[in-house]
Image (tube, coloured by chain):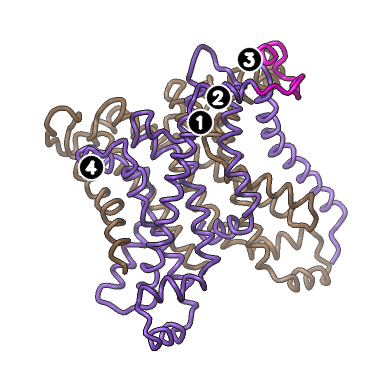
Amino acid sequence: MLAPTLALLVVFFIVPIGATAFSSLFSWDLLTEPRFVGAANYHALAAHGELLAVALRTLMYSAIVVAGTMTLGLALALALDRPGRVFGFIRASVFSAYVVSWVAVALLWMWLLDGNSGMLGRLFGALGAGPLSLLGDPRLALPVIAVVGVWKLTGYAMVIFLAGLQGIPRSLLEAAALDGAGSWARFRHVTMPLLAPTSAFVATTTLVTSFQAFDIVRIMTQGGPARGTELFVYAIYEQIFLNLSVGRASALTVVFFAFLLAVAGAQLRVWRARR
Amino acid sequence: MRESRRAYRVALLLAGIAAVAWIFPYAWMVGTSFKTLPEIVANPTAPLPRQFDTGAYREVFGTVPVLRYMAVTIAMALTIAGSQVALALPAGYALAKLRFVGKRFAFGVVLACLLVPAQATFVPVFLFFARLRLIDTMTALVVPFAASALGTFLVRQALSGVPDEIIEAARMDGAGEWSIVYRVLAPMLKPTLVSLFLISFVFHYNDYFWPLVMTTSERLRTLPLGVALLREQGTGVRWHIVMAGNVVLSAPVLALFAVAQKHLVRGVVASG
């Protein structure tokens, strides 16, 4: 009864990891025969500084997404955890961004940010005097797509925090209120500590999600300008489909997966603790 | 317990900001899709179109086989979601209720697969399908996701709350293992299965990455790919066309969300 699932998982998830590690030791352009090169792919990626740059960029993107998503998600969970249709509708609207495709979100924000005729693009342009292309600036593009990532994922964090808030006994908050604790003190000394496992859970899951970002890069910037938004998965995609370099793509994948494993190991521990 | 006035005011302010930040972009998307190109060029920041013009939609449906893209996408997502539920049930049952050699190891494999995203496997899987000449087929889109580690895990967790007596009783009545799984246990796990089906369907309907990598021709193009391509066609970006495509792409998921919000949210909370 387990056989079909186990077979599919092994073929499509376990074996590929091994195969990637293996092919990262070869130089292969998909046309000629693969050639064993040992660790040369890793050396080349490290030597050009490309590996470090991609890793740092991805971490920067993730840091903004995780921090922004958690802050906004928690704030909105607290603000919107009220009865009534209006609050319900706002909660649903925020969460709907998480349900909609990354493609739709990326295209929508490209239009809003368009320097010539986009609503926000013109607004920022007016503030900064003159047309401003937020996605065309090598320094701004990464934070800008990260903000779009925050917009997409905040609803997810909010929903998890709302579920966490349900688990806090009202009696505890009431007892604190009787002892004279105000709203802020109750939040700081009762709600926050009790939400710690939820927060850890949201932090690790959004970190893993943001680390795998691809759609938003491919659609909004194609890794540019000046490689300013080339994140891990996009770099892997470019190595295989643009440079036809299976070896380099595999080496990048191995490093990407090692990063992910470190985070996901922590996530699994959190997940088990939560159940 | 009384909330202080200041806390309430801050909450209202946040609610207002959230309403603007999350509702306005959608409104802008829909508004733009009903504008004409001259209107966008002349007055790009006008909040509402002067008159609701359906030209953008007519052009999207007229120049691009949107309905076919949507049929392909829905067929793919339904097959994946259905297969994941059908396979997760017996697999989760085996892990929760059966005794066999290597059970711990098998469960370890399932847990390990939770950590492996498609973004870390696509290079070898692409090469594998290329060798079998299966690139650009429904097989390449569906089979890698036919089984779900997450679904198996969720079913196992849900089943550990079901008493063994129910299974024993069914066995006494002469039910085989498969009919225990699909006839006796499936109805009891309905909430878990519905949530699993919905999040899987929505995820694969929306997916851009896998179809982008695994298809080369227009034959099996999915809706997210087709809509993303609207931006790259022709000279200059015609945003009313792109936004019309965006509305077509998002509407089914938003409708599903409106109908099944409870199940979707529960699925997301359960699965992370």
**The disc label shown at residue A116, or none:** 3
Which of discs 3 and 2 lies nearer the camera? The answer is 2
**The disc label shown at residue B128, or none:** 4
Q: State the residue in front, A226 or B174.
A: B174
Callout 3–callout 1 Cβ contact below 8 Å: no
Callout 2–callout 4 Cβ contact below 8 Å: no
Relative image position of residue B92 (x, y in whole percent)? 39, 69
* Chain identifier of the brown chain: A
Kind of residue at disc 2: Val
Kind of residue at disc 3: Asn
Colour assigned to chain B in the rendering is: purple
- Same chain under badges 3 and 2? The reply is no
The range drawn in magenta is: B38-54
- Same chain under badges 3 and 4? The reply is no
Name the residue that disc number 2 marks.
B60
- Same chain under badges 2 and 1? The reply is yes
Callout 3–callout 2 Cβ contact below 8 Å: no
Residue A255 appearing in the image: no
Which of discs 1 and 4 lies nearer the camera? The answer is 1
Q: Main secondary structure of the magenta part?
A: loop
Relative image position of residue A165 (x, y in whole percent)? 67, 62
Subunit bearing disc 4: B
Residue A146: within the magenta? no
Subunit bearing disc 1: B
